[in-house]
Image (tube, grey):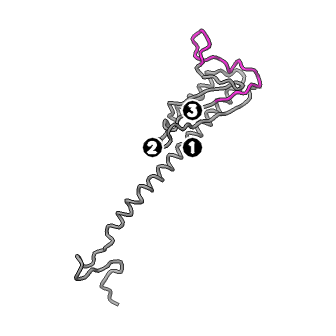
């Protein structure tokens, strides 16, 4: 059997412009123009969600390690803050909030209560045994976002808090 025409092409013949030209020539470009923005939004959304989960896990790990250090006898505010600072620097997070609580009373790590110029108040090492110690960390999502999705996050915060009792 002799085939003269390609099965996927329409032939316009005498009334058409070119014999054997596909009339769906521009359909693929139009379909791509419609689908590509949706596909890119989906891909960037997945990447941004993964980044948010990664930062959340970093906050949880930093808070857990810092709280674990804080409950050990002899721990100082400076040591606990050093653990938090180390985690944040390693992750490339420069703007974050870090606080600790002793039996529900919230303190900053840089509470200056000594007259010797020490920036740490030394509250953790003076806390009594069985005191609830909480390390609370938070960061703005916009400060850790990799892509343009931070525009949708607004002022949402990623945070983690870990509570343990002092030994």
Q: Residue furthest right?
A: 130
Query: Residue at 42% across / 60% down in the picture?
Result: 35
Tell me if residue 119 is in the magenta stretch: yes
Label 3 SS = helix
Question: Which residue was labeled with disc 3?
Answer: 87
- Disc 1 to disc 2, how far (Cα)? 15 Å
What segment carries the magenta color? Answer: 111-135
Q: Quadrant of the N terminus?
A: bottom left
Pointer 1: what residue?
Answer: 53
Disc 3 from disc 1: Cα separation: 16 Å
Who comes first in sequence, dot 3 or dot 2? 3
Q: Judge depth for marks 3 and 1 and give the one in front.
A: 1
- Report x, y in % for residue 143: 49, 35
Q: Which residue is mark 2?
A: 147
Foreground residue among 105 and 85: 105
Residue 114: x percent and y percent?
Answer: 62, 11
Magenta region, main secondary structure? loop
For residue 48, above or below residue 159: below
State the CA–CA distance, disc 3 to disc 2: 22 Å
Residue sitting nearer the eye, 67 or 15: 15
Q: Residues within 10 Å of mark 3 (few under 14, many from 20)?
A: some
Provide residue 14's location: percent of width, then percent of height. 22, 82
């Amino acid at each position: 059997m002799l085939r003269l025409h390609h099965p996927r092409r329409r032939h316009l013949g005498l009334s058409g412009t070119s014999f054997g030209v596909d009339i769906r020539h521009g359909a693929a470009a139009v379909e791509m123009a419609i689908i590509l923005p949706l596909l890119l939004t989906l891909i960037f959304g997945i990447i941004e969600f993964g980044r948010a989960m990664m930062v959340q896990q970093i906050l949880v790990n930093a808070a857990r390690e810092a709280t674990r250090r804080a409950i050990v006898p002899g721990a100082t505010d400076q040591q606990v803050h050093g653990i938090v600072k180390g985690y944040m620097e390693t992750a490339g997070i420069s703007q974050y909030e870090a606080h600790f609580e002793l039996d529900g009373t919230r303190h900053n790590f840089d509470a200056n209560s000594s007259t010797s110029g020490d920036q740490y108040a030394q509250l953790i090492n003076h806390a009594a045994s069985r005191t609830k110690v909480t390390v609370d960390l938070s960061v703005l999502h916009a400060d850790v976002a990799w892509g343009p999705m931070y525009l949708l996050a607004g002022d949402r915060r990623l945070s983690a808090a870990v509570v343990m009792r002092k030994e």
